[in-house]
Amino acid sequence: MDDLRQHLQVAGDEEVKISARNCQVFYGDTHAIKDVDVDILDKTVTAFIGPSGCGKSTFLRCLNRMNDTIDVARVEGEILMDGENIYDKKVDPVQLRAKVGMVFQKPNPFPKSIYDNVSYGPKIHGLARNKAELDEIVERSLRRAALWDEVKDRLQTPGTGLSGGQQQRLCIARAVATEPEVLLMDEPASALDPIATAQIEELIDELKQNYSVVIVTHSMQQAARVSQKTAFFHLGNLVEYDDTGTIFTNPQDPRTESYITGRIG
Amino acid sequence: MTLAPFVILLLAAAVGYAINIQAARAIRSNGVRLHSLEGFHGLFSLLLVIVPVLTLVLLWLALEGGVINRLLMASLPDGVLDGLDSGAVQLIGAEIRSIAGGRIFGTPEDWKLEAADRLIAYRQTSAWLLVIVVVLVSAALVFFARGKVAAEFRARQGVERITLGLMVFCAVVAIFTTIGIVAALTFETIKFFQLVPVTEFLFGTNWEPQIPIREDQIAAEGAFGAVPVFLGTIVIATVALVVAVPVGLLSAIYLNEFAPHAFRKVVKPILEVLAGVPTVVYGFFAILVVAPAIRQFGQSIGLDVASNTALAAGGVMGIMLIPFISSFADDALSAVPQSLRDGALALGATRGEMMMNVVFPAAIPGIVGGVLLAVSRAIGETMIVVMAAGLIARMTINPLDSVTAVTVQIVTLLIGDTAFDNPKTLAAFALGMMLFLATLVINVFALRIVRKYREIYD
Ligand SMILES: Nc1ncnc2c1ncn2[C@@H]1O[C@H](COP(=O)(O)OP(=O)(O)OP(=O)(O)O)[C@@H](O)[C@H]1O
Ligand SMILES: [Mg+2]
């Protein structure tokens, strides 16, 4: 625990975007997240790793209050974003989710045109004053998701007609179109081939110029490639949180070491 | 005596089952691995006996009467049937049968009494023959099935093949009955159109089907323009849908997305109960409650309202359709994957926006399919309109007027004295045909939409 504090302090010279304090999540009687404290930095990619069922997705969903949509889920503790508790009564979860975008493990484009998929967020949040601005947002988002060149001639065709990798990039474009401050990605590349994965990793690298990005991944290599910070979860506990380099070369906790070297999992 | 073949059949099947299981078990206890478990060997024998023999018995019983009748008529003394038409011959047959059954009226001729004795003898012979045939065939099949038992015999597949045959047979029965009904309908419709021109029926605006049945009856000539009848059905169905579609859809949306769990648990079963209410009860409700209420309300604001308005019939029919549409829409909404809902919420949509912009559009094909099926139920619905709609066909689209419906006309045309060579009666078939075609087209359309939509998410 002392080690952890120390590392958090090292992180202190960068700007903290989200910090969780004593965070607990229960699904009915199941205690899925136990007492998690973590500081997620701005303009940084943070990776969550850990064995299946350890609570990575659950914790990620705490950060944009998506757990509110699950009846049995209950969140305790504090999660501060820019110093404000997002579980406070006066925070509107709808507004919060506009600021904290999310990309899911399985691509989930709406059964609408590519254009409508990307423009949906800006439309409901009134980010564009006219059609020209909306067009611009759509183009910019698709370019950032490295999809523009592939779809610019068929923006009116259904998004569900794209390939799996293209659909995932469409979902990323849809998420960045609302100009979030934080982007949460739950295993965004798990259904993709190596080429599409590489494109997405490149995109994540680029996104961190402006956003704080949190990515859940089962691939150590991916975590090592894209992230600057890594958090290792095990059975609902945050075991270790540190610079990615430290986690992979010099883990402090024996559980982290055995997971990274392939003995837990 | 008629029971005997069935008892024998069941016994034979049971014996075959037991023998085959024994035989298979014997092979297995010798340490040989069976391809199929003992039970399948037993079942194989059971089915192999039951299916063909049962078919044989049923066919026998069905054809027996005709064959015996032939023999009986052929055995009558020469000359007694000379110069009689088919009706009279049938009467004689019936008389002989009732004598054989012990009901003797008056003093029948001797040859009839003899014929009755012969009939009884024929019947007994037939029954004995059947028993013998059943015993022989069953025994043969049991032996055959027993001979099949062997370690490598594929009884599992054998059982499947026989069951498959049975299923094919049932499917064929279902299809042929439908074809038969449609054929009968078509046949009568064609007869109707030989008496009344198609154009008059399809485009005529005057519907007064009261044709005299007896020569001396005083009645109108009869006019068969079906337009006002169909118009009536359309008016009533429209009123029904105006009630059912919004209420059904909104309740489905509420139950599916917004209702607290406890509320949903209470209301869903209530809707299902509503779907189980017999239409006759809705009919009561329409005449006893809704129609008087509408009339009173109309009078209180100075409107002249008929006592059996399209509004009352249609409104109550709409109430009947609410659970139908609501459960269809609920299914369609539930079929939209959770991931789409999550996607919309994660973009910062409210639950209402998520519903209206993402989930509902994704469910529209399924919902449209459900509404179309509701339409075909509305136009085919009979009991409510028979009770609550009018009898006189009027060219009106005013829902406060009394209108009639196609199903109502079919019922009235076929009630009372009917003669099947009369346009009045045949008109019912023509109306039925039109109704059938309309619902067929709507259903095909609806099912196609529903199916297409299923493909998207599976
Ligand atoms: N909706 C839910 N209802 C009840 N329990 C849940 C629910 N979602 C997750 N859990 C439980 O919470 C625990 C953590 O699940 P979570 O999905 O966060 O794991 P994860 O680390 O994301 O796993 P994976 O790597 O397989 O995605 C698991 O034990 C799971 O069974
Ligand atoms: Mg997960």
Image: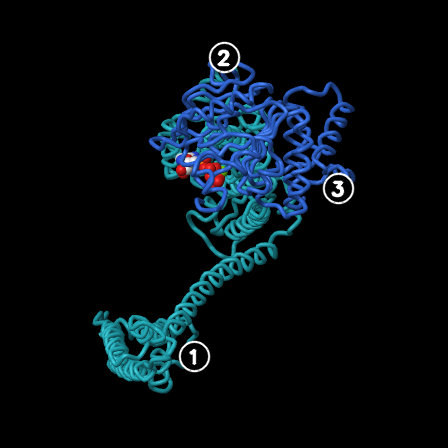
Chain colours: A blue, B cyan
Relative image position of residue B309 (x, y in whole percent): 49, 28
- Kindly indicate whether the residue at mark 2 contacts the one at mark 3 (C-beta within 8 angstroms): no
Mark 2 sits on what residue? A90
Residue at point 67%, 19% (across, down): A126
Q: Quadrant of the N terminus of chain B?
A: bottom left
Mark 3 sits on what residue? A150
Q: Chain of mark 2?
A: A
Q: Amino acid at mark 3?
A: Glu
Mark 1 sits on what residue? B83
Label 1 Cα crowd, 10 Å radius (few <14 / some 14-19 / many 20+): few
Q: Which mark is nearer the camera, 1 or 3?
A: 3
Mark 1 residue's CB less than 8 Å from ligand 1: no
- Kindly indicate whether the residue at mark 1 contacts the one at mark 2 (C-beta within 8 angstroms): no
Residue at point 49%, 24% (across, down): A38
Q: CA distance from mark 2 to mark 1?
A: 104 Å
Secondary structure of the residue carrying tag 2 is loop
Label 2 Cα crowd, 10 Å radius (few <14 / some 14-19 / many 20+): few
Q: Chain of mark 1?
A: B
